[in-house]
Amino acid sequence: GAKCVNRPAACSFRVLADPTFKGGLDCFPLVRYDVLRISGVAFVDDLPAGRLKVEGRNEVRLRLRAPPGVRGQAALSDSKGTTPAGVSTLVQRDGEDLVVVAVCPHGEFNLQISLRNRESARFMHAVGFKLSVDPGCRLTVGPLPKIFTLFF
């Protein structure tokens, strides 16, 4: 028969890095599945790997399937955590979905989406995306309408 020999497992890896690489890793989107589960929210489309690249127009739209009573809000910020001029977001209901719209100028941004259901007293961070607006992108979309708390 076959002879079985126990040997200690050994693995060796050598990681080679480009010394000229100055960027970070695209480990996005950051998804809080516990918040999505509590809220009953799911993604309609496949999640993008890495970052959302905006090409053509300076607007991105995402759809989240959300039960009645779930509200969403979105915010755009730059790498310093501030909201630069020329950015705007809007979350609105379209049937069974929450539609998240973000408009911004050229550059790199963070898009944060938060959710609240009927039982929650506050919005909870659910998803974070890196958003990259291509320099060749036409800035054709202007600011989005503001929603006042009166309508919540």
Image (cartoon, rainbow, N blue to C red):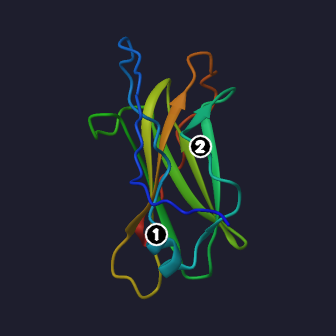
Location of the N terminus (image quadrant): bottom right
Instruction: State the SS at label 2.
Output: loop
123 shown above or below 55 = below
Image location of residue 91, percent across then percent down? 55, 59
Mark 1 surroundings: few (<14), some (14-19) or many (≥20) residues within 10 A: many
Label 1 amino acid? Answer: Leu
User: What is the total number of numbered labels drawn onto the structure image?
Assistant: 2
Label 2 amino acid? Answer: Ala
71 shown above or below 100 = below
The residue beneath circle 2 is 49
Image location of residue 6, percent across then percent down? 45, 60
89 shown above or below 13 = below
Q: Is residue 109 visible?
A: yes
Q: Which of 152 and 63 is in front in this view?
A: 63
Spatial CA span between label 2 and label 1: 22 Å
Instruction: State the SS at label 1.
Output: strand
Mark 2 surroundings: few (<14), some (14-19) or many (≥20) residues within 10 A: few
Q: Is residue 152 visible?
A: no
The residue beneath circle 1 is 115
Residue drawn 46% across the image and 69% down it: 115
Q: Which mark is residue 73?
A: none
Image location of residue 48, percent across then percent down? 62, 45
Q: Quadrant of residue 95?
A: bottom right
Residue drawn 46% across the image and 61% down it: 73
Residue drawn 48% across the image and 81% down it: 38
Residue drawn 38% across the image and 54% down it: 8
Discs 2/1, front:
2
